[in-house]
Image (cartoon, rainbow, N blue to C red):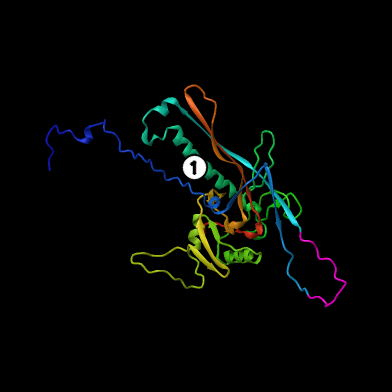
């Protein structure tokens, strides 16, 4: 079909307003699964402490009737553990003009910028709590640092060749984490490795509930055959290729992918090497200052806001968790 001469079409007009979504959708992931799963507590110092009591191992306990020579049983004392808080912050500065104009979704305003930076701050916190770093008391000019989850775990662990546990500043598990775990040789995740760590957690007294991993590990776990029997509700046009709940010999565990797992680069290839087995009852985010925003001194024709939070990771009992470390994408 033909178009009449001099018909004014959209192709000829440069002043048509773009179709910009008022909601201004963002694909950037903002969920913080680890922080949302574990508990929280308030602390009142940059160095915060907690105690853990381990009962003595079971053994033969048979006594003679009427025995008057019973000796004292070894006392059951608590282990004193600790960690440092760290400060995370974002600063927003918006000109008075930007605040006044009619922008798309008003993304340029102070309120929206503060909301975006709060989401970014949460993502930063999640990634750092899952990082393999030791704690640091800090100093003038040096930021304090809280230890990350991989550095805490020393009991229920499976590591690649040359991998090693982190250490603490005191005897045994006492004190703070003063050295991170040593990365070992990368290897594939297998069902046997995962089952072994789940069993270790259960033997230590924990009730594992969550397996947290990266995307490649989640896909690999979905290929596990288990006892080669799967039950599902059959629905037309749907292929179930995922394992979201793994029924182990010691109860069900959810398989949860986390986008903010730490990344390890080997030969220019990025891997998410950690697969955690978690009992969320035994970990908390310890807040010295919860997330807040404060106005900063006005500088000319602009407004500034400080968004900050001071917090640390408390792994109440590292024996309640486990890790299959040094995993590649195979």
Specify whether 167 is left or right of 191. Answer: right
In the image, which residues are magenta? Answer: 62-76
Residue at 85% across / 70% down in the picture? 70
- Is 83 magenta? The answer is no
Quadrant hosting residue 112: top left
In the image, residue 176 sits, relative to residue 236, either above or below, namely above
Percent x, y for residue 41? 61, 48
Residue extending farthest bottom: 65
Q: Secondary structure beneath disc 1? A: helix
Give whichever of 72, 159 is nearer the camera. Answer: 72
Give whichever of 160, 109 is nearer the camera. Answer: 109
Residue at 57% across / 55% down in the picture? 274
Residue at 37% across / 32% down in the picture? 103
Percent x, y for residue 250? 58, 68
Quadrant hosting residue 290: top right
Q: Decide whether the magenta segment is chiefly helix, strand or loop.
A: loop
In the image, residue 265 sits, relative to residue 242, either above or below, namely above
Residue extending farthest front: 66
In the image, residue 228 sits, relative to residue 21, either above or below, namely below
Q: What is the crowding at mark 1: few (fewer than 14 residues within 10 Å), some, or many (at least 20)? A: some
Residue extending farthest right: 69
Quadrant hosting residue 205: bottom right
Q: How many marks?
A: 1
Residue annotated with mark 1? 119
Specify whether 250 is left or right of 108. Answer: right
Residue extending farthest top: 300
- Viewer can see residue 158: no
Percent x, y for residue 15? 26, 30
- Viewer can see residue 283: yes
- Is 68 magenta? The answer is yes
Percent x, y for residue 210? 55, 60
Residue at 57% across / 53% down in the picture? 38
């Amino acid at each position: 079909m033909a178009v009449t001469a001099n018909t004014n079409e959209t192709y000829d007009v440069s002043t048509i307003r773009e179709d910009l979504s008022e909601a201004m959708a963002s694909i950037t992931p903002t969920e913080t699964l680890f922080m949302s799963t574990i508990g929280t507590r308030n602390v009142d110092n940059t160095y915060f402490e907690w105690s853990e009591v381990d009962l003595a191992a079971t053994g033969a306990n048979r006594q003679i009737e009427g025995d008057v020579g019973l000796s004292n049983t070894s006392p059951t004392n608590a282990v004193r553990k600790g960690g440092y808080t760290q400060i995370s912050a974002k600063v927003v500065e918006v000109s008075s003009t930007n605040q006044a104009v009619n922008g798309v979704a008003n993304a340029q305003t102070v309120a929206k910028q503060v909301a975006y930076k709060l989401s970014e701050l949460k993502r930063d916190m999640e990634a750092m709590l899952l990082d393999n770093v030791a704690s640091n008391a800090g100093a003038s000019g040096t930021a304090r640092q809280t230890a990350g989850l991989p550095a805490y775990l020393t009991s229920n662990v499976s590591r690649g060749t040359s991998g090693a546990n982190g250490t603490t500043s005191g005897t045994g598990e006492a004190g703070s984490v003063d050295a991170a775990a040593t990365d070992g040789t990368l290897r594939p995740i297998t069902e046997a490795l995962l089952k072994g760590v789940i069993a270790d957690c259960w033997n230590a007294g924990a009730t594992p509930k969550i397996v947290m991993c990266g995307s490649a590990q989640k896909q690999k776990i979905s290929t596990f055959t288990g006892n080669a029997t799967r039950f599902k509700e059959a629905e037309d046009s749907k292929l179930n290729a995922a394992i979201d709940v793994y029924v182990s010999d010691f109860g069900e565990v959810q398989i949860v992918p986390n986008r903010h797992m730490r990344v390890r680069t080997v030969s220019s290839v990025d891997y998410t090497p950690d697969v955690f087995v978690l009992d969320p009852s035994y970990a908390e985010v310890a807040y010295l200052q919860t997330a807040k925003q404060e106005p900063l001194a006005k500088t000319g024709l602009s407004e500034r806001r400080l968004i900050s939070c001071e917090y640390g990771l408390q792994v109440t009992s590292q024996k309640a968790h486990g890790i299959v470390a040094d995993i590649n994408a195979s």
